[in-house]
Image (tube, rainbow, N blue to C red):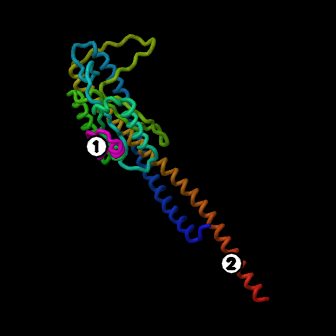
Amino acid sequence: MANLKEIRNRISSVKSTRQITSAMKMVSAAKLRKAQDKIVQLRPYADKLHGVLVEVNKSLQGCDVENIFCKRKSGDGKILVVVVTSNRGLCGAFNANVAREAKRIMTERYPDKHNKGKLVFMSIGKKGHDALKRMRCNIVEEHNDIFNNLSFENTSLIASELIKKYVSGEYDRIEILYNQFKNAAMQRLTTEVFLPVQEIEESVGKGIATDFIYEPGVETIIQEIIPKSLKTQFYKAILDSFVAEHGARMTAMHQATDNASDLIRDLTLQYNKARQASITNQLLEVVSGAEALKG
C-alpha cells in the first residue's frame, strides 16, 4: 500500500486537475450558449434558401442559359474535400471522427482519384490539418485561423474562392466534411456536396414541377442568388462545426470532472485506510513497548 504522503500528493494533483476541467466546462458552456443561438437562427434561413437554390437549379435545366454551377456532363478533374475540425483538443472524439472519415473517403470512396493525385484536401482547423499530414494527404490549402474571428464575411471569402475554382474547371466536385451540431452531447458527422448544386430526388407520387417566371432574368439568378446561397451553406457548415466543438468539449470536460471526483473519493478512502493502518501499527508498538517494560 502506498504511503500517506504519496496518496496526499495524488489527491492534491487530481483536485487541481478537477478545478481545471470544471473551469473549462463552464467556459465551453458559455461559448456554446452564445454560438448555439446563432446556428438556431441561421438554420431556417439557410435551409429555405438552399431549397430555393435546388428548385431554381432544377428549373434552369430547361433554359437556354448555361448553369455553370450544375454537374458537368464530362470531366475527370480533381475532387476537393474541405475538412472542418477544431484548433484545440480536449473535446472527446470530435476531431478523431472527422479524421477517420477523411481516411475512409480517401481509401474507400475515391481510391482511384487518390492514386492519380486528383483527390485534394483543404483543412479548416489545426487538428484536422495535423491529421491529414499524418495520413500524407494532398493538402492544397489551410485556413486554421478562421475560428479566431468567425463571421459570414470571413467564410464568404473562402467560399468565393471555391466557387471560382469550380467554375474555372479546376475542381469537378467539392465536398465539406464536418460535425453537425445536434445537441450538447451529440454531433452528427456529415459530408455535404458543396458543388455541383445537387437536385432533390423526386419522390413517388409527387406533383409536376413548377414553372418559374424569372425577374429580372435567368442570368441574374445564376450570378447573384446561387453564389449567395452557396456562401450561406458554407458559413452554416463552419458555424455548425464551431458549435458542435464547444458542445463536445463541454461534455468531455463534464465527464473528466466527474471522473476526477470519483478518483478523489477512491483515493480518500485509500488514504483513510492507510492512515488507520498506520495508527493501528503505532498503537501496537506502544502496547508492545509497555508490555516489554513490565517484563
Label 2 SS: helix
Nearer to us of marks 2 and 1 is 2
- Which residues, given as a range, are shown in magenta? 129-146
Q: Residue at x 35, y 30 (%)?
A: 110
Dot label at residue 143:
1
The quadrant of the rendering that contains the C terminus is: bottom right
Separation of marks 2 and 1 at Cα, in angstroms: 65 Å
State yes or no: discs 2 and 1 in contact (Cβ < 8 Å).
no
Locate residue 219 relative to residue 132 in the image: left or right: left
Label 1 SS: loop
Dot label at residue 219:
none
Q: Which sits earlier in the primary sequence, circle 2 or circle 1?
A: 1
Up the image or down, 215 lies above or below 78; here it is: above
Near-viewer residue (7 or 241) = 7
Percent across and percent down for residue 222 are 24, 23
Percent across and percent down for residue 121 are 30, 37
User: Label 2 sits on what residue type?
Assistant: Gln
Up the image or down, 93 lies above or below 233; here it is: below
For residue 292, say whether it is visible.
yes
Up the image or down, 34 lies above or below 207; here it is: below
| Residue at the spot of label 2 | 282
* Residue 202 on the magenta segment: no
The quadrant of the rendering that contains the N terminus is: bottom right
Near-viewer residue (228 or 198) = 198
* Residue 131 on the magenta segment: yes
Q: Residue at x 45, y 44 (%)?
A: 93
For residue 52, say whether it is visible.
no
